[in-house]
Amino acid sequence: MLQTKSTRTALTVIVCCAALAVRAHAGPPQPATPDDIAKMVAEAGDKDKYDGADYVDLLDEADVYVRPSGLATTESCRLIKVLTDAGVKQQCVQRFDFDPATRRVTIKSLRIHRKDGGVENVPLNDIITQPTVQRWIFWGGDQHVVSVPNLAAGDTIELHVSKIGFNIAYLAGANETEPGETLQPPMPGHWYEVTLFQGHHPVVHKRYSVHMPKEMPIQYEVYNGPLKTSLWTTDNYNVYTFTADDLPAIKSEPHMVALDDCVPKVVMATVPDWEMKSRWFHEANIDQFKANDEIREKVAELTKGLSNIEDKVAACNHWVADNIRYYGTSRGPCEGFTLHKGAETFRDRGGVCKDKAGMLVTMLRVLGVEAHPALTMAGSRVEDIPADQFNHTVTVMKDQAGEWKILDPTWIPLSREMWSSREALQGLVYGTPEGETLTLSPYYPPSYNQLTSRSQSRIDADGTLHAEIAMSMSGYPDTYLRRNLESHWRPNIKHVFEEVVNIAPTAVVEKLNYTDPYDYAHDATVEMLVSADNYTGGGESACVFRLPLMKHPLADWLIPDLFNDFSAETREYGMHMRATRGLHYEETVQLPNGWHVTKLPDNQTLESPAADLTFTASADGAKLTYTFELNVKQHLIEAKDYPKFKKAIDAMKDISNAWVVCERTQPENGESKHAWLNRKESEVHND
């Protein structure tokens, strides 16, 4: 049966049972037989058939057997044909990562189908089990490692693997859910999964079958494209199957959205709704937020002299952000959804996102604020089906008006923000005793992430530029500045500014004032007096130069993602900017007496769903003024909106690189002013 989109169990059962009546002789899909595999290998073809890929999955199939406890065993077979020498390097060692506290992995067999037709069984007695490489988070993960001997281009690897349990550890105090079984699912009695059907290498055939006990209802949905779906019934199971054929490799694009948001996937869950997930998350952590005397003393110290609750909350949020280092240590089988106790995090001065969120919950409750942890997914969507689609934990609180407010002490070190604007329109589930549904974080308009620059500039008769620049910033540019300031040695900071001021290679910062990166009371500001020798080019009768502020001072620090790779004319997938953005520039350039502006960049106005741009410039004798404004209105640029977004970015770059042409009073060597200007402009463009 073919369905392009499936939602709820009841509808699926009705349709598929009708299919069963018509095809009574059929049954649930079965694992590939040795004859099936031999045929796939024989018909595979070479790299030309797969657009030059290094390897291809001829078969990727999995049968998931769910138990009433919520635990599941997955029996999988993968058939990998190696097409190039690079593919040999990628596949000659097979690695299987797992957390021994929550998952077991057994490599059942490994065969090599040689390109000459021979088949070899690889002995499995030399499998190495070793710790995985761990950085920042040390939760004791392991991996099985097995070598594939004498692998060559044209060979095919056949792997049969059995897995039981879950990807990460979840809850403390796990009890045996079945005789002899010490693994425990996150939510006892429930199972959920997200399965992607496409990636960065081609797949000829992928099948994913879930054998669900008949007494366990499940809901599912297919996203980002059609899959073949079916439901078959056996004596003990309802068998849900999803298949796809001839899936090409996803070709990466610069700063593309997550694969989860653009490739076909199935999201499945026995959990009936997000409210249940919310209540469960609350109950799983109900005892983690008890404060001790040391925490109460710290809260009193941080909030001393502060009169309103908003300032007190901000003081606690920033303290956790700046003083609890990001690193994860294991408490045994209690990681993942279980937050470390606030007293432990305070003692250790360290933890991962969930622990920092729990630390903040603990401190806010000392203030008498209703606060809870919340689950979210940084970097991709959370779909409607209540499966585990989270990689991040934050804090939510109710303000004095009874409205929820989101706080994130993980993402705001050295930032005035209380919740990062990079996390706009992001799915969240709050962990509360009443139970909350899936919600979205706020949208942040370009004005929230604003960079405003004003300059009073002067050019001397010898071509030296003097620019008095005043910059103010909020949101993401403010955060960028603070973090860059803190990462450099203060006595050398003026020279660092000269490296990134970006106005001219000869630029010198003569005076400099900037915001203390740890002063969160006000938006950040920078004031600079910048000079640059030989800023203009030309002769005695005319000269050329570029608009100083349009060179984007401190661009590498404040707006680096506006200078990403936007060379492609179109995109197949959406693009991820760090945040919405607003730029507003105002500049006056005073020229020497006797100079007159004869050519300026053209005025422009562009509007599109993703970005707007306005540029206006005028000259009055020896004085020119202009304003420039760019508003990036979306941080996720859809593929259909990309061409007009690119047009705005290209227009900004064109204005930045355009020459201002000025005429001096006297022509050079008797040459007409008009002829000199044409010749000079041609020379500039040729250069």
Image (cartoon, rainbow, N blue to C red):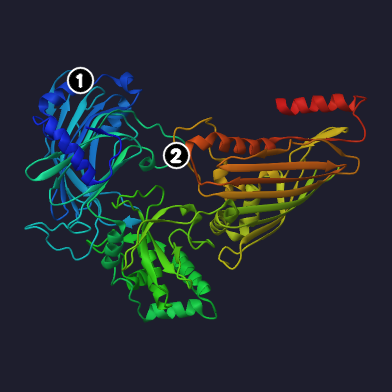
Q: Is residue 671 above or below residue 476?
A: above
Among the 4 quarters of the image, the one containing residue 645: top right
Instruction: Specify whether residue 243 is in view.
Output: yes
Can residue 352 be seen here? The reply is: no
- Residue beneath the point at 35% across and 79% down: 292
Q: How crowded is the residue under tag 1: few (<14 C-alpha within 10 Å), some, or many (20+)?
A: some
- Seen at 73% across and 49% down, the residue is 586
**Tag 2 and tag 1, C-beta contact below 8 Å:** no
Where is mark 1, residue-wise?
A: 115
Name the spot of residue 397 as percent of width and height, x first: 42, 68
How packed is label 2: few (under 14 Cα within 10 Å), some, or many (20 or more)? many
Name the spot of residue 432 as percent of width and height, x first: 33, 67
Foreground: 655 or 94? 655
Give amino acid for label 1. Answer: Lys
The disc at residue 256 is 2
Number of the front mark, 2 or 1: 2
Q: Where's the C terminus, which quadrant?
A: top right
The quadrant holding residue 297 is bottom left
Q: Can you give x and y, in whole percent of width and height, for residue 76 in the image?
A: 17, 38
* Residue 44 locus on image (x, y percent): 23, 21
Mark 2: amino acid: Met
Whichever of labels 2 and 1 marks the residue nearer the N terminus, that label is 1
Left or right: residue 679 compared with residue 585? right
> 82 left or right of 26?
right
Quadrant occupied by the N terminus? top left
Closest to the observer, 351 or 448: 448
